Image: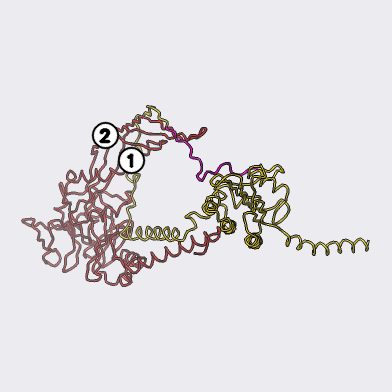
Chain colours: A red, B yellow
């Protein structure tokens, strides 16, 4: 099932506009609010076998998609289309954070980021070989998690004092026990096979105030994918993700000791809720030195992640600059205190 | 009135001629034990005068033998009270090395004392460092070399702020280089590490503060253990440190045996 969003004004195809948060028509500039967009303007075409091949309503061209695509553009006429059958039933996202950064803004921000690269080669900084920039809704699972934590630990308090000809070290041992409830809300985990997990983790955090109920028009004009992993399959990953957070919180409840050694840390994690959400990401593909570098930008906050190439000569220059500056500084202080010049 | 003025100015004029004369006659080496040859004594006197002038502090060497029954420390203190040394004034800035030849080899005492500015720059610790460095020469009966080393050490220590150990690593070039390279490496390393974007979520980003709490806690005292270590006496056989002369002048100091 292929869905088009037709402009009620002129009949052209509409796409989601990140600046206004509305559906906008490129031809006549008409805007429609997503919540009130009339169904009669949504044209749907059913395909017989719901295969990976769809036919564009406008031009009849074949819209080729891979098995995970849920939104794309017709490669001939450019109309933004949504594959609604891949967004229904189990595959229906609960929430979406719409793009707030447009393609031009993303490009601008990326160029600025490249220019600020202190350790990247000079040719890379101009950002003039950006091959492709794609706005994509990446599928995520968000988990609400409740943890019941029992901690047993031994804490020590050390006091040092001097009496007569002796130095005394007094160590007091305490049995520490804590029973803690730790809850986390909407911890995101990327559910797409194609996306690099480390890259996606670094894109966080998103501003959840802009988390909207899912509506297909948000996807118009962007790429979107469906999840490859279910929430149960990613449960271990989200547990690993909050492990460090929990350790930090547990440590914050045990204070006033010189050392704490844990004997037992029982964590029972329960999933209270999981949501299927689509989060906005600008993917930037940059050819440099016959290598393709992939960068991702948070489509809501503009945060850019991805490993740029490293210029060894620049790194060396920074290293020598900082080190020799510090050396001169130390030497100056030493000379002021009365040290020799060499 | 006019006559009075003339008297005062002529007195001032006379004193201008006399005072340099006093300085010229200043003695730095009091060799009661007769351990230096005449040549050595003349040479040491001259060097002591130079170092004293350069550092604006009197640098003296006293020696004594069994004919004076006092210990070397009160000997130096009484000397200070009687002779009123000092570069800037009577009872002024002075560093004194005292050598007592009363005992046999290995049982003879030496003491380094610092008064006023000398107390500041040649404090107990530094006096001990000087004592420790003089002992090898003294034990080998190279008294002249020990005297020269004493002057050099005082000259060096007077130039170094009392905040740092003049012979410590803090003033060494290799230490500065090492720390600069380590910090530079750490900064550039973290720059490279953070090139790909930093993780900006922390333990509180997704925390649901309304439903996170400590339900119960206990901190029960189990037991106590106490270990004690004997405080080590400072090395080199030094005892005491500074003190106060009978005339009421405080000083730093350290002693040793040679």
**Residue A112 place in picture, x, y as percent:** 35, 66
What residue is disc 2 on?
A266
Q: Which mark is residue A320?
A: none
Query: Where residue A235 sits in the image (x, y, percent)?
Result: 20, 43
| Few, some or many residues within 10 Å of mark 1 (<14, 14–19, 20+) | some
Residue underneath mark 1 = B208
Q: Nearer the viewer, mark 2 or mark 1?
A: 2
Please determine whether, in this image, residue B66 is positioned above or below residue A120: above
> Which residue extends farthest left?
A49
Q: Give me the residue at 34% from left, 59% from top.
A: B189
Q: CA separation, marks 2 and 1? A: 20 Å
Describe residue B255's horizontal placement relative to residue A242 as left or right: right
Does residue B238 belong to the magenta stretch? Answer: yes
Point out the stretch of residues depicted in magenta: B227-243
Quarter of the picture containing the N terminus of chain B is bottom right
Q: Residues within 10 Å of mark 2 (few under 14, many from 20)?
A: few
- Residue shown at the point (27%, 52%) measured from the top left: A201
* Residue A181 falls in image quadrant: top left
- Is B1 left, or right, of B17 in this rendering? right
């Amino acid at each position: 099932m292929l869905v088009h969003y037709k402009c009620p004004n002129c009949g052209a195809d509409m796409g989601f506009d990140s600046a206004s948060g509305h559906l906008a028509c490129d031809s006549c500039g008409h805007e429609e609010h997503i919540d009130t967009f009339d169904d009669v303007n949504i044209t749907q075409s059913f395909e017989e076998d719901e295969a990976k091949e769809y036919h564009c309503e406008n031009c009849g061209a074949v819209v080729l998609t891979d098995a995970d695509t849920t939104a794309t553009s017709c490669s001939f006429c450019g109309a933004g289309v949504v594959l609604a059958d891949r967004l229904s039933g189990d595959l229906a996202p609960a929430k979406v954070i719409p793009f707030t950064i447009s393609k031009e803004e993303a490009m601008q921000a990326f160029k600025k980021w490249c220019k600020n690269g202190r350790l990247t080669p000079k040719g890379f900084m101009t950002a003039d070989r950006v091959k492709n920039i794609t706005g994509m809704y990446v599928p995520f699972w968000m988990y609400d998690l409740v943890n019941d934590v029992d901690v047993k630990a031994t804490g020590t308090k050390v006091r040092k004092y001097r009496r007569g000809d002796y130095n005394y070290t007094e160590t007091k041992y305490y049995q520490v026990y804590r029973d803690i409830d730790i809850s986390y809300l909407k911890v995101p985990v990327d559910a797409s096979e194609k996306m690099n997990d480390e890259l996606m983790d670094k894109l966080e955090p998103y501003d959840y105030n802009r988390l909207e109920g899912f509506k297909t028009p948000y996807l118009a004009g962007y790429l979107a994918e469906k999840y490859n992993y279910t929430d149960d399959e990613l449960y271990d990953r989200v547990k690993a993700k909050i492990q460090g957070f929990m350790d930090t919180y547990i440590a914050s409840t045990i204070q006033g000791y010189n050392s704490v050694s844990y004997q037992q840390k029982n964590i029972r994690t329960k999933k209270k809720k999981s949501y299927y959400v689509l989060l906005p990401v600008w993917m930037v593909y940059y050819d440099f030195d016959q290598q393709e570098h992939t960068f991702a930008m948070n489509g809501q906050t503009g945060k850019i992640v991805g490993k740029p190439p490293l210029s060894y000569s620049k790194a060396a220059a920074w290293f020598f600059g900082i080190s020799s500056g510090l050396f001169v500084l130390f030497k100056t202080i030493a000379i002021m205190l009365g040290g020799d010049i060499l | 009135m006019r006559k009075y003025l003339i008297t005062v100015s002529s007195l001032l004029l006379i004193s201008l001629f006399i005072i340099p004369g006093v300085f010229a006659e200043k003695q730095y080496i009091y060799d009661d034990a007769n351990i230096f040859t005449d040549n050595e004594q003349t040479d040491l006197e001259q060097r002591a005068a130079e170092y004293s002038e350069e550092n604006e502090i009197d640098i003296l060497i006293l020696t004594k033998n069994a004919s004076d029954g006092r210990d070397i420390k009160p000997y130096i203190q009484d000397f200070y009270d009687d002779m009123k040394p000092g570069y800037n004034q009577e009872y002024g800035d002075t560093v004194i090395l005292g050598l007592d030849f009363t005992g046999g080899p290995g049982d003879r005492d030496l003491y380094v004392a610092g008064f006023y500015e000398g107390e500041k720059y040649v404090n107990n610790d530094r006096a001990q460092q000087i004592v420790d460095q003089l002992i090898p020469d003294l034990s080998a009966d190279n008294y002249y070399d020990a005297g020269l080393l004493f002057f050099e050490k005082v000259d060096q220590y007077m130039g170094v702020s009392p905040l740092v150990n003049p012979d410590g690593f803090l003033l060494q070039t290799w230490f500065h280089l090492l720390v600069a390279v380590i910090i530079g490496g750490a900064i550039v390393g973290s720059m490279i590490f953070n090139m790909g974007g930093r993780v900006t979520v922390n333990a509180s980003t997704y925390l649901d503060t309304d439903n996170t709490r400590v339900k119960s806690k206990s901190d029960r005292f189990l037991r106590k253990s106490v270990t004690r270590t004997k405080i080590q006496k400072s090395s080199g056989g030094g005892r005491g440190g500074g003190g106060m002369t009978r005339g009421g002048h405080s000083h730093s100091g350290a002693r040793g045996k040679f």
